[in-house]
């Protein structure tokens, strides 16, 4: 099974009830295509949604979501990299995501080296790295942080010289 990541933007903000309805609608289709929903992050404004699945491949997730009536989004296979020594409680307390896009493929180690060099900036702003989702084509990255707020992460990332596309706070939804 592969780690499959899905990014979607919604014109109308999603509510918690909308999220529950999405999960209910997709459940059967996901099961038919052997896709397992692992969790989702919904932006504070309800317009950005990032979902994590394990599935045979990205096409299985694409078909299942389409059959469930879910709008199209960016679907990509990737890998997951947790912070050294992190645990489930830290993952559950993550509250800010940083998205990164690269014109050319990058090495995860190169991005990690920049962040390691700027570790003091993160610490100064009480920002703790928790997890990275890294695309198989090495052009996309979603990094989760635990922080006082999204602005603390923005400032720490800028001071550390990290590449940043967007920074947003989120609420987590996970299977029960």
Image (spheres, rainbow, N blue to C red):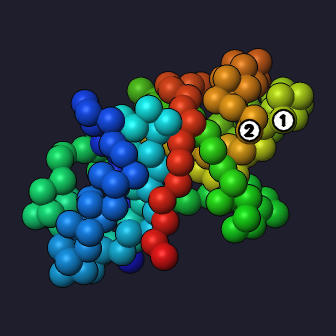
Which image quarter holds the N terminus? bottom left
Q: Tell me if I can see residue 2 in this picture.
A: no
Please provide percent x and percent y for residue 34: 27, 80
Task: Name the residue that disc number 1 marks.
Answer: 126
Residue for point 33% across, 42% down: 14
The numbered disc on residue 109 is: none
Quarter of the image holding residue 103? top left
User: Residue 66's x, y, as percent?
Assistant: 13, 58
Marks 2,1: beta carbons within 8 A: yes
Q: Secondary structure at mark 2?
A: loop
Nearest the viewer among 12 and 5 is 12
Residue position marked by numbered label 2 in the rendering:
147
Dot 2: few (<14), some (14–19), or many (≥20) neighbours within 10 Å?
A: many
**Of the image marks 2 and 1, the number of the one nearer the N terminus:** 1
Left or right: residue 163 versus residue 42 is right
Find the residue positioned furthest to the front.
17
* Residue 29 locus on image (x, y percent): 18, 73
Tell whether 171 sits left or right of 61: right
Q: Secondary structure at mark 1?
A: loop
Query: Distance of mark 2 from mark 1, alpha carbons?
Result: 6 Å
Examine the rendered structure and indicate whether residue 165 appears above or below residue 15.
Answer: above
Q: Is residue 151 left or right of residue 100?
A: right
- 34 w.r.t. 138: above or below: below
Q: Residue at x 55, y 60 (%)?
A: 80
Tag 1: Cα neighbours inside 10 Å, few (<14), some, or many (≥20)? some
The residue at 67%/59% (across/down) is 91
Quick check: can you spot residue 26?
A: yes
Q: Which of the two residues, 10 or 65, is positioned nearer the viewer here?
A: 10
């Amino acid at each position: 099974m592969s780690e499959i990541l899905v990014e979607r933007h919604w014109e109308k903000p999603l509510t918690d009830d909308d999220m529950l309805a999405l999960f209910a609608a997709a459940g059967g289709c996901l099961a038919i295509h052997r896709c397992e929903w692992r969790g989702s992050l919904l932006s504070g404004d309800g317009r950005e949604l990032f979902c994590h699945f394990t599935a045979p491949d990205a096409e299985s997730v694409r078909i299942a979501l389409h059959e469930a009536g879910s709008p199209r989004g960016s679907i990509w296979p990737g890998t997951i990299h947790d912070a050294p020594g992190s645990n489930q409680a830290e993952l559950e307390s993550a509250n800010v995501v940083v998205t990164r896009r690269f014109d050319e493929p990058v090495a995860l180690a190169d991005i990690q080296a920049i962040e390691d060099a700027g570790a003091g900036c993160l610490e100064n702003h009480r920002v703790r790295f928790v997890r990275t989702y890294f695309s198989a084509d090495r052009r996309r990255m979603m990094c989760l942080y635990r922080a006082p707020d999204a602005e603390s992460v923005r400032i720490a990332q800028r001071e550390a010289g990290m590449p940043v596309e967007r920074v947003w706070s989120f609420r987590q939804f996970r299977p029960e």
